[in-house]
Image (spheres, grey):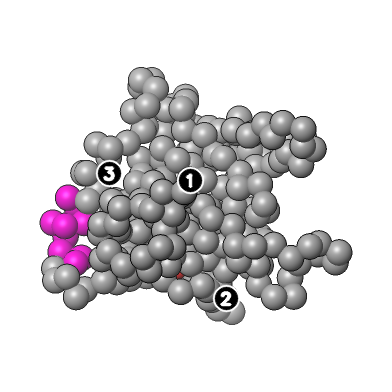
Amino acid sequence: MTMDAAASKEILRHVFGDSSDSEDLEPGDGSDSDPTRFWEPIKQIKGLWLCRDFLSPQHQSSLLSTIQNEGWFTQASHNQAMRFGDLPAWADELSCSIRKVALANDYVFYPVVLGSNDGVKENASPFPSDLLCREPLFDQLILNSYQSGEGICAHVDLMRFEDGIAILSLESSCVMHFSQVEGTSRENDPPVAKIPVYLTPGSLIFMSGEARYHWKHEINRTPGIQKWEGEELTQTRRISITLRKLCQVE
Ligand SMILES: O=C(O)CCC(=O)C(=O)O
Ligand SMILES: [Fe+2]
């Protein structure tokens, strides 16, 4: 981390508090102070980060019950719901938690690629500080519910949303594929194939910069496509929660 980034993180900690303000909880409990929650960079895609254990299984079930009780998806035919402006309490809690986990994690997980020199730079951080300090962090929410076989076509999120988009996965695991938007690769870079990212229940991805603007994301749940480590994934219903911030209209 550069001194500037470190200094602005320190200021943010003073403003928003951090994990040391909350009670110490056991590792693996999925709390904001859980030291096992790491941000993992997806090294081929600048600005794409994954937090695998963002929500513990208990937190996932209680969030799913809340969503169920609030009647967001009363019929199987209801597969998308949106909210703008004031978000439900649980979404505000998620936003708060995302901010805290980002502030708490000065350390990130750097996969060691033997014999390779393409590691992620040490000053990489999942959240550019200007995004981390905006208020509110998010003011738009989409809940998507996918039955098995259903997914979402390759797209870049609309430009009416600011940079910095978080997606939480619940229920069925899936593979999200990222493909570079034409004309955005750096000169002399060889064309890249689609990059698969494995999203397990309770995991959170955060996209900013290139990941948000230069890469399309998609989930193709056609049989034969959802494979991870050579194994076809078993599909059940999947729910995702996308959090974004609308651009200000002058
Ligand atoms: O369901 C997901 O994980 C992705 C949703 C998404 O990309 C969107 O709503 O723009
Ligand atoms: Fe999207």
Label 1 lies in ligand 1 vicinity (Cβ under 8 Å)? no
Cα gap from disc 1 to disc 3, whole angstroms: 25 Å
For label 1, the crowd category at 10 Å Cα-Cα, with few meaning under 14, some 14 to 19 and many 20 or more, is few
- The amino acid marked with disc number 3 is Gln
- Please give the range of residues in magenta: 65-73
Q: Nearer the viewer, mark 2 or mark 3?
A: 3
Residue depicted at 33% across the width and 28% down the height: 29
First-in-chain label (1 vs 3): 3
Which of the labelled discs sits on residue 60, or is there none?
A: 3
**78 sits to left or right of 175:** left
**70 sits to left or right of 183:** left
- The amino acid marked with disc number 1 is Glu
Residue depicted at 22% across the width and 44% down the height: 61
First-in-chain label (2 vs 3): 3
Q: Nearer the viewer, mark 1 or mark 2?
A: 1
Q: Which residue is mark 2?
A: 159
Q: Quadrant of residue 80?
A: bottom left
Q: Is residue 31 above or below residue 211?
A: above
Q: Which residue is mark 1?
A: 229
Q: Nearer the viewer, residue 115 or 73?
A: 115
Q: Is residue 67 magenta?
A: yes
Residue depicted at 59% across the width and 57% down the height: 195
Q: Quadrant of residue 142?
A: bottom left
Q: Is residue 178 above or below residue 7?
A: below
Give the x, y percent position of residue 6: 70, 35
Q: Quadrant of residue 189?
A: bottom right
Give the x, y percent position of residue 101: 48, 38
- The amino acid marked with disc number 2 is Met
Q: Secondary structure at mark 1?
A: loop
